[in-house]
Image (spheres, coloured by chain):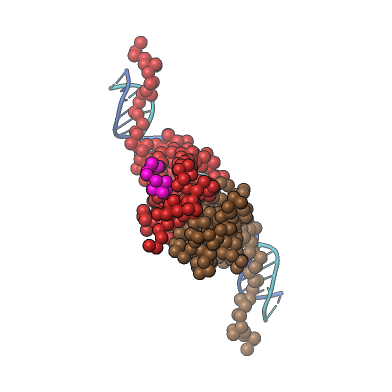
Chain colours: A red, B brown, C cyan, D blue
Amino acid sequence: MTTTDETQTARPAGRPRSARAEKAIIDATLDLIGESSGLGELSIEAIAARAGVGKTTIYRRWSNKEDLLVDALATLKSPLPSLRGGSVREDLVAYVEVFQRDACDASKRCVMNIAMNEAERHPRLVERIRQVTIEPRRAAIAALLRRGMATGELRADIDPLIAMATLIGTAMWYVRSEGAAEVSRELAERVVDQLLAGIAPAGAVNAGAVKPER
Amino acid sequence: MTTTDETQTARPAGRPRSARAEKAIIDATLDLIGESSGLGELSIEAIAARAGVGKTTIYRRWSNKEDLLVDALATLKSPLPSLRGGSVREDLVAYVEVFQRDACDASKRCVMNIAMNEAERHPRLVERIRQVTIEPRRAAIAALLRRGMATGELRADIDPLIAMATLIGTAMWYVRSEGAAEVSRELAERVVDQLLAGIAPAGAVNAGAVKPER
DNA sequence: GTTTTTCGATACGAATGCGTTTCGAAACGC
DNA sequence: GCGTTTCGAAACGCATTCGTATCGAAAAAC
């Protein structure tokens, strides 16, 4: 019988692949994605050098560059602030603040660049990013807006798509144009409050949002 | 004397450089910038081929790729909608609409990508873009906001930087996330009106901005 | 110990692009 | 016509990167 364990996991016999090398490759890939602009500038050889790994070890696991990128970006867990805080305003502020910090982080910033610019060149990659990173966040904001419209903290006739674009677009553009130095909770509050004053009911339910002079 | 016209334009004697070739090079460069994502993917040889020109003709005018890019992007005149329309709202709508259309145009979109992503790699280039393209538009919006605050069409205590980020960021993000298909004046109006309801005075000076149901 | 597989390192051929050079033809002033 | 300069085309040396192949060493199962 010679101990044939065919029914088991069928371990391949031989030196097992190093999980440590695999992690080093993924980490190096994410590092270099963050440092480069555009996927074309990213080279397998640079990844191998950064990871302290031979190219062989990379090509034994992924057959080409795009396959590696798909797996690397998929490991970028989306930590979704998604606090169920007390008020809609608090949750919006928390979200904007996290988003602003993400916009300053090199690797996460580049993920958005890829999603926006390389849709035609790398459709599989972009689709994966949309599913893993973008869609959950979009869903979270949409739910937050719906909650606000239900509780009356937000006006009922707002356009959710535009409101979402305003939240994210304002945060991103401000960070990019004014510099990432001054990201703070206070800035997130100003952004949200200026938006809230628009989407809040015409009455003064959210009077605190737009602080009167006195 | 042998007719030495040293004081004149001192024409160089010999076959003059072809202005037609120069324009073809610039046009080809802008075309390819729009089609590629990232400056690294742009090749001089592709530009020469697209322009129907020898590489010699390019290198005789510009000593390297970056010099060519600087000049090419500098020719992108910024047509600044900048209408002195009747109301601040009208001007804002006009600006947002133009900005949305620009965000769909491949070459102009890439200009913004360069300005945002390649600041460290090509500082001269980015600085030039800022001066030629970004700064005039920023100044125009800032003036428009000041005008609104002066005339009372806008609240006096708004944060101009955040308001500008909201205008541009919302338009850009909406176009990118929802697809460029549905760019229209009506969309620009919805974006501006949702912002206006926020930055307009608490009273109802701009009651027309947020149309009541009836 | 033997076998099998992976390890990192290195070299390879093919492709691409840079910036330069050379070439014959063409366009200008004289 | 003559000298000068630019033209497009082609080739050059050099560098980089791809994806593959080869090497001796190391790590597991047997």
* B75 within the magenta span: no
Magenta span covers which residues? A82-92
Front residue of B158 and D11: B158
Q: Is residue B161 left or right of residue B48?
A: left
Where is A95 relative to B26, above or below? above
- Kindly identify the residue that appears in the image at 61 percent across and 80 percent down: B9
Residue B162 found in image quarter: bottom left
Residue A65: x and y, percent? 47, 41
Q: Is residue B99 left or right of residue A176?
A: right
Where is B118 relative to B181, above or below? below
Residue A42: x and y, percent? 45, 47
- Kindly identify the residue that appears in the image at 61 percent across and 83 percent down: B8
Front residue of B179 and A189: A189
* A87 within the magenta span: yes
- The residue furthest bottom is B1
- Kindly identify the residue that appears in the image at 60 percent across and 62 percent down: B90
Assign the N terminus of chain A to one quadrant of the image: top left
- Kindly identify the residue that appears in the image at 65 percent across and 68 percent down: B19
Assign the C terminus of chain A to one quadrant of the image: bottom left
Q: Is residue A87 left or right of residue B110?
A: left
Res. A46 in view? no
Residue A193: x and y, percent? 43, 54
Front residue of B126 and D28: B126
How many numbered marks are there?
0
Res. A17 in view? yes
